[in-house]
Image (tube, rainbow, N blue to C red):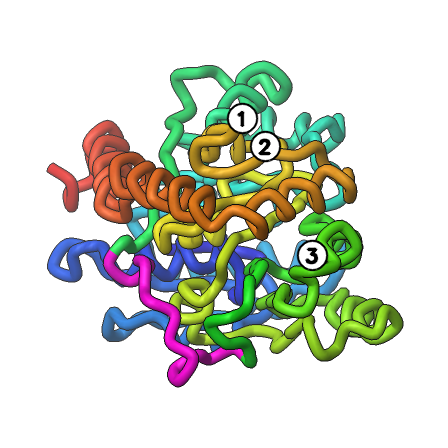
Amino acid sequence: MHLAYALGVGGLETLLVDCINKMPSDQYRHVVVCLTRSSSFAQRITQPDVEVYELNKAPGLGLGTHVDFWKLARRLRPTVLHTYNLAAMEYAFTAALAGVPVRVHAEHGRDTSDPQGLNPKHNFLRRRLAAFIDCYVPVSEDLNQWLGQVVRIPAAKTLFIKNGVDTDKYQPAPRDSDGNRAPWGREHFVIGTVARVSDIKNHRGLVDAFIRLRALLPEQAPNVRLSIIGDGPLLPALRAQVAAAGLNDVVWLPGARSDVAQLVAEFSVFALPSLAEGTPVSLLEAMACALPVVASKVGGIPEVVTEQVEGSLVPPQDVEALAQALARYATSPSLVSEHGRAGRARIVQQYSMAAMITAYTGLYARLGRQKRVAAFR
């Protein structure tokens, strides 16, 4: 049973769906529970007979949602509960009351309102729930250290599992102007990003850096383009920012898309100026497509991107540094190719989907044997 706040478009949701689709169907059956609502993203689940439940939780404490979840867990009787991020964590306690034997909690990134993970109430809750969680899974070394040093979760209760991507689905592809899905041609230098349009991803800063880039490179400016793929609460404001700057002809904001792999392959460079991160899946996907990266030096990003090897790292909220880093790629096709090839090699070697699935199934089996669950004997 996978429990998340919602099932929309995002990196966490992508990993959740990938885990379901890639785990051996003769060993695992899955159910997805959304504390709030699901979306058409659930259609990406290809495993048969995977049910998706919506608990329609209202804002606030939601004691009634705990009752609904308890009843559902009692009826479905899952062997493993896998919760994702802070909003779902407290339901490990409810699952324990419902008799769910194995309870795993994954930390994919900190909350937008607390990007450094210092909120004392949240961290007190994380510690208190340790008695009901068999293992915490941070997806970056940064989150792993934070759980141990700040939250003070015992090392014996944590297991760092790297996010993984499908390197067959995400791979380099020749840019063909006749087949492009974006409104750009092969003559354009395309800066692209894929992320939920929210404060923590700092899309506004990316647009500001794009404006600065065009000023830095007046001769190249006519051929520079920006693609921002994703939906979210700030998309209308972002579109207004682009329109106010007179950039509608050179910035593309299509919202959420189902053809992300094809769109990413059409980028020239991938940009991610986030304010905080775990290990962003979209970054791994872009690197698998052999794209150089310009990203903020936050969270787990420096664990994936080595400065001047697979890309460039800049301080968060530094528009000038972001623009300068993008300018280096816009003026050096050889650097684009060199860093792109290095990024692809790093993902294939260290961030494969197969390694991630093996780690999760191994964790489930180990905890199941410890709990003497018949399915894992």
Q: Are marks 2 and 1 in contact (CB under 8 Å)?
A: yes
Q: Residue under label 2, please give it.
A: 299
Picture coordinates of residue 256, whole percent (x, y): 56, 73
| In the foreground, 118 or 213 | 213
Q: Residue under label 1, please give it.
A: 142
Q: Is residue 349 left or right of residue 4?
A: left
Picture coordinates of residue 148, whole percent (x, y): 53, 17
Q: Residues within 10 Å of mark 2 (few under 14, many from 20)?
A: many
Q: Earlier in the sequence, mark 2 or mark 1?
A: 1
Q: Residues within 10 Å of mark 3 (few under 14, many from 20)?
A: few
At a point 52% along the width and 53% down the height, the residue shown is 269
Element class at badge 3: loop
Q: Residues within 10 Å of mark 1 (few under 14, many from 20)?
A: many
User: Magenta span covers which residues?
Assistant: 168-182
Magenta stretch encompasses residue 161: no
At a point 68% along the width and 71% down the height, the residue shown is 251
Q: Amino acid at mark 1?
A: Asp
Picture coordinates of residue 184, whole percent (x, y): 54, 76
How far separated are the C-alphas under marks 2 and 1? 6 Å
Q: Residue under label 3, please give it.
A: 62
Q: Amino acid at mark 3?
A: Gly
Magenta stretch encompasses residue 174: yes
Element class at badge 1: helix
Element class at badge 2: loop
